[in-house]
Image: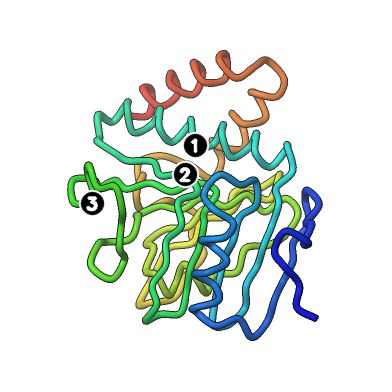
Amino acid sequence: MLLELEQIIVPPGQQLLLKNVTWQMYERILEELGERRASRVNYSQGTLEIMTPLPEHENDKVVIGDFIKALLEELDTEFLSLASTTFKNAQMSAGVEADDCFYIENEAAVRGKKRIDLNVDPSPELAIEIDITSRTPLDNYQALGVPELWRWNGDKLEISVLVNGKYVKSDDSRIFPQLPIAQAIPKYLQMSKTVGRNTAMKAFRSWVRECL
């Protein structure tokens, strides 16, 4: 007996892995689940992951995303944040939904587009993953050619940069080389949880201006 998607329940903070899923099945699952859903779906070489985030996960995602937006605004740099947009490439047999992602240098190339096709369009330069309940594998992002990936585990920000098609851990961000991002994000994220989001955001903006 085959299970229907509506029969599957993934509790918050948990993930479901399905093996031997074809690309056609993956695309059909995305279509059936629709865009208005709480779960996130990733696909790599026949393995499908369905994950439902915790409230803590969502809070950290939003605040870190707000810090990046504030930083880019202070740098007077145009950008496009596409949150958990599905990025996929059939040739690479990979599909991913980041917690957040940003077009920065290539923002103009995708500006105004209603659909982004990674077969012809560039990948976002930066992807953010909140790894509080599980660790995000690098395979999908490597296959899709995302230049920089940040993974937050609730305590530490790990920066990985793409070098010759493989991710290498880095102490610094190539996108923001003038700033000690790995130290600043944890500091101001924690501040937001003690004194409030707005106060932390103002302090973060002041810090950015002092560094520039």
Q: Which residue is mark 1?
A: 65
Query: Disc 3 marks which amino acid?
Result: Asn
Structural distance between the alpha carbons of marks 1 and 3: 18 Å
Residue at image coords 59%, 61%: 41
- The one nearer the camera, 147 or 123, is 123
Residue at image coords 69%, 57%: 51
The colour scheme used here is: rainbow
For label 1, the SS is helix
Query: Disc 1 marks which amino acid?
Result: Gly
Q: Which residue is mark 2?
A: 83
Which of the image's four quarters has the C terminus?
A: top left
Left or right: 208 in relation to 17 = left
Query: Disc 2 marks which amino acid?
Result: Ala
Which of the image's four quarters has the N terminus?
A: bottom right
Residue at image coords 57%, 13%: 199
Q: Which residue is mark 3?
A: 106
Residue extending farthest to the front is: 1
> With respect to residue 97, does 205 lie above or below?
above
Across and down, in percent, residue 162 comes to 40, 68
Q: Residues within 10 Å of mark 2 (few under 14, many from 20)?
A: some
Q: Earlier in the sequence, mark 3 or mark 2?
A: 2
User: How many badges with numbers are in the image?
Assistant: 3
Left or right: 138 in relation to 178 = right
